[in-house]
Every structure is written in C-alpha cells, then in structure tokens.
Image: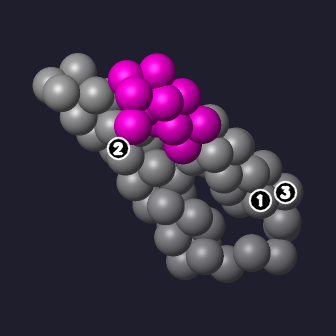
C-alpha cells in the first residue's frame, strides 16, 4: 500500500467515524422518551469516537 493509499484510507475512516459521531449526537438529543441511562451510553460512545480520532491522528503522525 502506498503512502497516498494509506492517507486516503485514514481520511475515509475518520470521515466514517465523524459521520457516526454526528448521528449519535442527533439521536441522543432527538428523543425525549430516551432514558437517562441510554443517553449516558450514547454520550460515552460519542466520547470514545472522539478518542479514536485522536488515536488515529497520533498513529498516523508516528508512522
């Protein structure tokens, strides 16, 4: 895999993660019937996605 292919793959992966992150934000704010526990779990998932992006960036920087 060339450097360009790796860069493209990382960019696409980060895009998918951010898209899912955005959908989680919409889902957690959109439902009034959602329990506090469910909203908390969605928020934890959102935070994990942000942390994954940071880790991907660090991995790319170190390679």
Q: Earlier in the sequence, mark 2 or mark 3?
A: 3
Magenta: main secondary structure equals helix
Which secondary structure lies at badge 3?
A: helix
Q: Residues within 10 Å of mark 1 (few under 14, many from 20)?
A: few
Q: Position of residue 58 (x, y in %)?
A: 23, 29
Q: Which residue is mark 1?
A: 27
Which secondary structure lies at badge 1?
A: helix
Q: Which mark is residue 51?
A: 2
Residue 23 in magenta? no
In the displayed structure, does residue 2 sit left or right of residue 59?
right
Q: Residue furthest left?
A: 62
Q: Position of residue 38 (x, y in %)?
A: 60, 76
Q: Nearer the viewer, mark 3 or mark 1?
A: 1
Residue 7 visible in image: no
Point out the stretch of residues depicted in magenta: 1-14
Quarter placement of the N terminus: top left
In the displayed structure, does residue 3 sit left or right of residue 43?
left
Image-quadrant location for residue 51: top left
Q: Which residue is mark 3?
A: 30
Image-quadrant location for residue 63: top left
Q: In this rendered view, identify the residue nearer to me: 9 or 17.
A: 9
In the displayed structure, does residue 59 sit left or right of residue 18?
left
Residue 6 in magenta? yes
Q: Residue at x 46, y 21 (%)?
A: 4
């Amino acid at each position: 895999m060339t450097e360009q292919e790796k860069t493209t793959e990382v960019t696409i992966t980060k895009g998918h993660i951010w898209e899912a992150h955005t959908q989680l934000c919409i889902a957690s704010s959109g439902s009034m019937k959602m329990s506090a526990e469910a909203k908390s779990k969605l928020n934890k998932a959102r935070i994990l996605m942000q942390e994954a992006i940071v880790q991907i960036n660090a991995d790319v920087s170190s390679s």
